[in-house]
Amino acid sequence: MKYDIDKNEYGFDTAISASDWKYSAAITGLLYYFKELEKKYEIKTLTIDEITDNFLLYNKEDITEESYLNFIEAFYPEDTLVHKKIETQLKYTKEFTPEIIKNIKENMSANTVLKKVFSKIKFDGTNKEEALKLLEENRHLIIKETFRNKKDLYDNYCQTSRLLEKGDNSPCRLKGYYFDPNRKSKATGYNFASSSVDYFDDEVFDFIPFAFTGNSFETIFLNDNLNLEILEIMNFKLREYFSEEKEREITNIRTLKQEKAMKEGKNEPIEETSVSVSLKKIFLNILQKKTDYIKYGMEIIYKNRDKEFFETWYLRNESIEVLKAVENFSKLDIRIKITDKYYFNLLDEVFSAILNLSLLTNSIVYLLKDRENFIKPDTSKENLSKFFKYNYAIEQLIKVNQIIRNGGKEMDKNLKASIKACASEVVRKFIKDNSLNKLASYRQKLLSSVVAKNHKRILDVLTQLSVYSGVYFSFSFDYIENQTQNEDIIHYFILELDQSRLESKKNKENEDKE
């Protein structure tokens, strides 16, 4: 909430508190603004209208359109504000080759406002001073219209027509809160109730876009609003950590692509535009690596560019403990094409499960089924790599499932060892009999029974397999005790029930001996 206060008493004329996530985000954006432009502000605990809270104090006169636009230019990099790239090219290019001239002309027509400004000249490399003059004369217009209309900037968060407008009795400018009262649409059609509209708008909401961290499609804001100094630190650090982790991921992706290109005999540079990094992957890695960063649960505001509303996630204390159990989230970055428009995204599934403390059973079964495509003696190196990646992912998902089921505890070590030992003995039997196809058949029978949730059939298949292999399945009694609660026992047994797992175990034992 925002209040007018006595400047003579407080030294500032405006106080704002983090009364909800919108004001929390606006405060975070304002703090970036005040620091960048070196404006005076203060964070202080006050009692206003009989409410004691932590307030950000500042002067209205320090927020002007010119300063706001200057801040936008300083806040965003060249790849976000193309006019900055144009200016750098014009100022620091020593020789304007045809390729460079072509690139500058493409940048000059990157959006509507740039096309309009630079349509007055035909750039050929000899008239750079004229181009620079046009840019300088129209700098604030270019910044304002680019920021207003770019899909990953203001237009992602707010109604574009409300940029730099005063907060009045209009609907709230944020996406998902705003509607145009002069425009007839389904939103204001049948059974429309004006009471459902948030009419509380505020010009400080124009600072909300700066509070979000992420990529051009997905961004998040941490609403840790118990204390404004903590709110500031949490989101400032998130931006810092995100930048570090993103750079690391991009480097890794580039290295892998270059190695692949070299193996295929290609010698082409990897374009930076071709490298994209998942927001959830980076955020999960941050939460895992920076163990002292988030110590307690909080509200997270999420914005997807393709959606006209904000989403709220709740990171619980229990979720933080589950996060710490996963060894490497980067290895869980598995995407499987289902249709032309839909992909199974494992990281999304894991992220959602950990936040909501829901089970990953469906994902485990799906990966176990898809893994069957790669369990072949003559499989390619690429498929073998996928196979090992699946094995790691399934093992981690089972671990997460167990922690969520058992209130923070993993599967009992003795039980796990028993399952692994039984599976190894069974595999040895089938290898000795040279009947790996029959082993695959038993795996398929178990998987089909698991998918159908047919516990009787699962026990029948286990009995048949035990009799055929001559191996006593001691773990089956744990499963029988509570078949639904202990279904991860079967998942883990299926995971271990292939020859590659046995070979990996032998290799590890040999390495340990050496």
Image: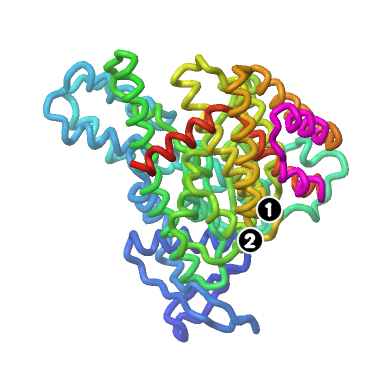
Q: Position of residue 276 (x, y in %)?
A: 44, 33
The residue that disc 1 covers is: 357
Q: Are marks 2 and 1 in contact (CB under 8 Å)?
A: yes
Q: Residue at x 34, y 59 (%)?
A: 36
| Residue type highlighted by circle 1 | Leu
Q: Position of residue 204 (x, y in %)?
A: 53, 59
Q: Looking at the magenta stretch, what is its main secondary structure? A: helix
Describe the element under mark 2 as helix, strand or loop: helix
Which quadrant holds the N terminus?
Answer: bottom right
Q: Which numbered tag is attached to residue 318?
A: 2
Please say if 512 is above or below 499: below
Q: Earlier in the sequence, mark 2 or mark 1?
A: 2
Q: Which residues are magenta?
A: 458-481
Q: Position of residue 166 (x, y in %)?
A: 55, 56
Is residue 464 on the magenta stretch? yes
Residue situated in front as seen by the camera: 220 or 500: 500
| Residue type highlighted by circle 2 | Glu
